[in-house]
Image (cartoon, coloured by chain):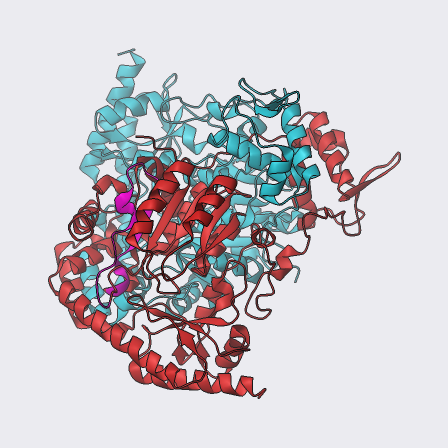
Chain colours: A cyan, B red
Amino acid sequence: MNIRPKPAEPGRIRYTQVYKYILDRIHRGDWKAHDKLPSVRELAGELQLHRLTVFRAYGLLKEQGYIYVKEKSGYYVSGGRPYTDPAEPEDASNTRSNLTTGGAGGTTFNALARHGTGHLQNTLSEIHQIPAVYSFSQVLIDPNLLPNLFLSDHVKQVFDRYPKLLGTYSSVQGDEELRELLCADMQRKDKLQVSCDELLITTGGQQAIDLLAGVFLRPMDYVLVERPTYSSALDCFRQRGARLLPVEIHRDGYDLDLVEGYMKRHKPRMFYMNPTFHNPTGFIVPASQRKRLVELAERYGCLIVEDDAVHDVYFDAPPPPPLYSYDTEGWVVYLRTFSKYLAPGLRICAVAARAAVMAPLLTAKSLADNGTPLVNQKLFQHCFESERLQQHLEKLRTALQIRRDVMEQALAAGTGWQWYRPQGGLNLWVRLPEGLSSNQLLTEGVRRGLTFVPGTICDPLGEMDDRIRLSFSFKNEAQIREGVHLLVQLADELARGG
Amino acid sequence: MNIRPKPAEPGRIRYTQVYKYILDRIHRGDWKAHDKLPSVRELAGELQLHRLTVFRAYGLLKEQGYIYVKEKSGYYVSGGRPYTDPAEPEDASNTRSNLTTGGAGGTTFNALARHGTGHLQNTLSEIHQIPAVYSFSQVLIDPNLLPNLFLSDHVKQVFDRYPKLLGTYSSVQGDEELRELLCADMQRKDKLQVSCDELLITTGGQQAIDLLAGVFLRPMDYVLVERPTYSSALDCFRQRGARLLPVEIHRDGYDLDLVEGYMKRHKPRMFYMNPTFHNPTGFIVPASQRKRLVELAERYGCLIVEDDAVHDVYFDAPPPPPLYSYDTEGWVVYLRTFSKYLAPGLRICAVAARAAVMAPLLTAKSLADNGTPLVNQKLFQHCFESERLQQHLEKLRTALQIRRDVMEQALAAGTGWQWYRPQGGLNLWVRLPEGLSSNQLLTEGVRRGLTFVPGTICDPLGEMDDRIRLSFSFKNEAQIREGVHLLVQLADELARGG
């Protein structure tokens, strides 16, 4: 076994660190324009460093125009805009797409990669918080499609069985009975080789992504991401200062030569992917590519983060086996959201990873929240164990398929709307009639109580303003019809310049 | 209003960033000793940077001995140990205390501050995972002290009331009814000025600390911490590469001149404190100091993170008002753990913060997990609302006080043990008989089914090996007597060299 994925290690840094430290304090306003900075001697004393180290840091800051020297007086903070390296556009971060400015992003991935290094943003979450009658932004199952009475009754039995449940903590890794249950399920249904020790329970898939980004990414690291993809994952990677390398996803998967080229040239730390009923497109990466991708990950030392959020929501045939099933060397981490179609409020995700990835992940999880609350795990375990679940899942698939069909019919009433018919998942990825902007349409939509996800935030390049993601899982058939009717009407109005 | 706490902003970095990037890849093993590095032209092409930028980075790496040049061939990774700046001890990270090596830590805070920059560790969590009959390490209420039957019944009513609870997500900030309830409680009982918008619900206090560290700390930032303190908070700060400035806590609080001196000299970003029934000592920072600390925070722009985990576990009088009650300018964030004494398994913490702190915190929370599960919040809300809670709390205080007394009696049977009698909280902070090491004692203890927290991990300097933290909340009176008896016996054996 050659398990190499290791948590990012801190580099040994000297005056460059002091440089960054001073710059941070200037940005933060501790020292303002034309303020006198501490002398080299003072700062060296304060930081308990060699004076030469501080001197070098000041030298670099001066060279870059952040500070200046007054003779016989000392160092001062510059007033204007510091010197900008022409190769690195200063304003890249301003081109970051958001609700109001749309996706005027850079045209090369590198320009984009610099967007929001360390930037704290989550536009998708902001959209979800907009109250809307026709909410097509949430990839959430309509609670009316869940066996609520059954769940409530079941829950009560759980509390009878574990009367001290509200008083007990879980282990950091997650409840052992639950992990055994999920392992057995994945072994049986998906032929996955996974042991109880190789599973971590997280509070939803989002937490798993955030933990993995924290453990494995450092500023400047490259991350392969699909184009388009799940925007909150992009925000997690951006927050860590990573650089995004977009890989287009098509209905037959990726361009593997391109992927290999990127791996060879850029040594990305991670490939975040969503190969099964892909969010937002609904595409399925074919089995033949899955095997090959795992080989590439091994060869180039790139950790594949396989996000499998809607594995069981298929309409015709079950999806191909996860990439994780081909992994023998520990280069795939598998994120399987389990609670979404049964009891989404419990937020149970299982992360499968080999020991080298699991160990630092457990530490990160312990620092993040000491373990997912036991009550959520036990409630989920007992719902999941019940025979009723399988029946529910079948009904749910039918119900969702009908909603997909209703949404397609409603969209077909408009002119110039195009989409791919997904064989599973919860979304339609729709190309707007020519000339329409997803962000403009959303602005209008919000005024009329309608939300969806604009293409720009799904695109790591901030483009794709001609696409939208419409979820058909959260609203019922009548609401879907009315909402899509309204959407088509709004689009017509915009097209007429109304 | 002069609200200034702002999330740390990324510095604009150029060749220093490339320097760090190359160093990371060397550390990671992408390029091994004596491997040829890409040429300046190649790397500049790969990173889409100006060649001069890469050239400078290589220059710096060469100067520091990480790489060397072969004439007419190119750059190579060094084989030996790179040049070490004498002012910055290379091996500082090795002196970090842990279970096996004990606290041979550096003697200046600065040596320590460099420990584990970006290091992923949580020793406390590792101790908690050791199975033990006499577990005195967990600061958890014994589930037998909770009104379990009442809770179970109550929970069932909640599911009757909200039949779709398991199918519903919470907002990122937390359920509004719960926030209203907790606001009202804090206004009424603690005279806190806090509005519903100023509260965020997190999955326990640990998550709140981790989110705050992520939003406000960057490598090299100073953080004031108490000595001793809660070790998992230290681990969170270390993970972000922060430098720890320890402030001794005494039974009459801190040395405020020292605190002011640190603030003036080092401009710490944050003061993480636990002023009420302090963990591990049980001390209470007096009201007179609280007001003054808020003034200092305002004057020097240092965010106070006030962790109030056991506010309601007092034995005689309620504690003084939180520092948050004196804050008018937004320099205090208040972490109030609510679920600990009623339904700890639900993991409900309320974070009170003014708008400038709340905004980035909400984004971080959305990226971390999209919001604490609604089911935990609703269950807690209805348990907390019930009249029965107040009666339970009174009984609980009495029960815990008795356990404290039992533990003190049992310890008094040994020779040379010393401790402070806490007026609240869940721990005794005990000085061991002369010559004993907490880590040695723990190693022996674990073999005999007994755990506690060694002083070294509570001490930001990694010293205090002569202290231990014993929690009296998790085990019953008989177990406390037996366990402490065993502990005293083990100490005697160690003292006799047995």
Vertical order, A441 against B176 (above or below): above
Q: Residue furthest front?
A: B257
The residues colored magenta run: B315-341
Vertical order, B77 against B385 (above or below): above
Vertical order, A469 against B209 (above or below): above
**Image x and y of residue B165, in percent:** 21, 53
Instruction: Answer with the quarter of the image where residue B463 lies.
Output: bottom right
Q: Residue furthest right?
A: B71
Q: Residue at x 65, y 45 (%)?
A: B24
Vertical order, B90 against B172 (above or below): below
Q: Residue furthest left?
A: B387
Q: Tell whether position B338 is magenta.
A: yes
The quadrant the C terminus of chain B occupies is bottom right
Q: Residue furthest top?
A: A497
B336 or A278: nearer the viewer:
B336
B312 or A49: nearer the viewer:
A49
Please state if B283 lies on the left or on the right of B374 as rendered. right
Q: Is residue A152 visible?
A: yes
* Number of marks in picture: 0
A332 or B150: nearer the viewer:
B150
**Image x and y of residue A454, in percent:** 37, 29
**Image x and y of residue B193, in percent:** 21, 43
The quadrant the N terminus of chain B occupies is top left
Q: Tell whether position A432 is magenta.
A: no
Q: Is residue A313 visible?
A: no
Please state if B180 lies on the left or on the right of A251 as rendered. left
